[in-house]
Amino acid sequence: MVVKSNAKWIAFFVIILSFVSLFQHLFLARFSALSLLDYASLSKSGDDFHSISRKKKRKIHNGKWGEGVIKHLQSSHTNLQPQSLNIDHGDYVNNTNNVFHDGNIFQEDYKEMKKSFKIYIYPHKQNDPYANALLPVDFEPGGNYASESYFKKLLFNSQFITKNPNEADLFFLPFSIARLRHDTRVGVGGIQNFIRDYITNVSQKYSYWNRTDGGDHFYVACHSIGRSAMEKTGEAKFNVIQVVCSSSYFLAGYISHKDACLPQIWPRKGDPPNLLSSNRKRLAFFAGGINSPVRVKLLQVWRNDSEIFAHYGRLKTPYADELLGSKFCLHVKGFEVNTARIADSLYYGCVPVIIANHYDLPFTDILNWKTFSVIVPTLDIPLLKEVLKKISSDEYLRLQSNVLKVRKHFQWHLKPIDYDAFHMVMYELWLRRSFLRVPSNY
């Protein structure tokens, strides 16, 4: 009996030690040396875990070191406190209101990206039967899903393109979801079949796809149907990098460390004429279709409020005037987590309030959203006014000041300028490249 009892205790301790060993292994794999630096910074600054850039948490784990990280760690006088750097009119300046997770790392990596990042685009001719969906549009993009067409149009004419696939960091699959859904030969129901056949042809004609099963390939889509474009391509849907507007990490089709959020931006030119002088008398504003339970709840609670203007249907006043006249502008989840309202808010200098759970926000690897927006869980919609009223005047001015600093990152230009939406998306892709280039005869 004593022997059996001792055996049970020994077995128990073996199990405990196994769990301890497993936990230690997972801990060391998850928290790299850079992550420990982050936690040291947290202990001094008082920030919480979610304010750390996801880019820095995964740098070593994914083996995708950036030049900025390497220099940052090699410096003999590395300061564990985050550097206060911001972009102001295209330049970095010292500022205590840091909209970046780490301005030093971003600056170094951005320079390296512009110098060395290369992308190969699978070639297609003007007489291709589907040239309308495979080549860039020949007009200036517009509308709700313009981001997809803008990125593609700018990429084709950018310094990042290489004609030599052996020097490419990534490969671009140039099909346009926006164009395919309106093509009568394909339509919404035929997109998955089209992409399956396209990838089959690419894998048979070129050797690059088969080296990684599409792991160094990416595509771009802003309409929500683009997120399921790879459903009929086997393992490719788990390998190919998605750059999509509908970036919800709640859904299995989107993998946040692999995929990236494309900001949904309604293109606008210039600045609003009265951006700085506008009198923002209203506390908060929302207008849009009632196409989700979250929006239904918002209207139920705040539709008749005197300080929060929650509206559905056609506005009686210009949309721009409502954005310019409100302190906070509400981004409320509809069919998807994304809408163009965040970019609208930033464009008109209105602090965005994000009411959309599980939203992998645009450029969240780079920007600290807590410095220029307010994030409210959908369950807290009844507390919305209380949350906003607790924000002091000084804090609001800080938020709005940072809104004006990040606006440039959410704007498209026919000729890209530094730190605009095109370059920020390119930077997100650069983070997802691999340093290992597989030979074409692999």
Image: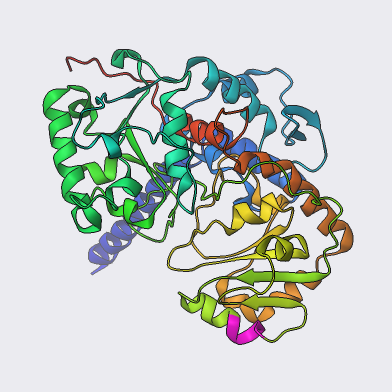
Residue 250 falls in image quadrant: bottom left
User: In which quadrant is the N terminus drawn?
Assistant: bottom left
* Residue at the left extreme of this rendering: 204
Q: Residue at x 69, y 43 (%)?
A: 406
Q: Return the x and y of residue 173 as percentages of the image width and height.
A: 30, 34
- Nearest the eye: 52 or 36: 52
Q: Is residue 359 left or right of residue 133?
A: right
Q: Is residue 143 magenta?
A: no
Residue 267 in view: yes
Count of picture labels: 0
Q: Return the x and y of residue 392 as percentages of the image width and height.
A: 86, 64
Q: Is residue 162 above or below residue 372?
A: above
Q: Return the x and y of residue 200 as percentages of the image width and height.
A: 13, 36
Q: Is residue 344 above or below residue 86?
A: below
Colour mode of the rendering: rainbow
Residue 61 in view: no
- Nearest the eye: 23 or 430: 430
Q: Is residue 93 left or right of residue 265?
A: right
Q: Return the x and y of residue 337 as percentages of the image width and height.
A: 48, 62
Q: Main secondary structure of the magenta part?
A: helix
Residue 160 falls in image quadrant: top left
Residue 25 falls in image quadrant: top left
- Nearest the eye: 26 or 339: 339
Q: Which residues are magenta?
A: 299-303
Q: Is residue 323 left or right of residue 424?
A: right
Q: Is residue 75 above or below residue 239?
A: above
User: In which quadrant is the C terminus drawn?
Assistant: top left
Q: Residue at x 56, y 27 (%)?
A: 415
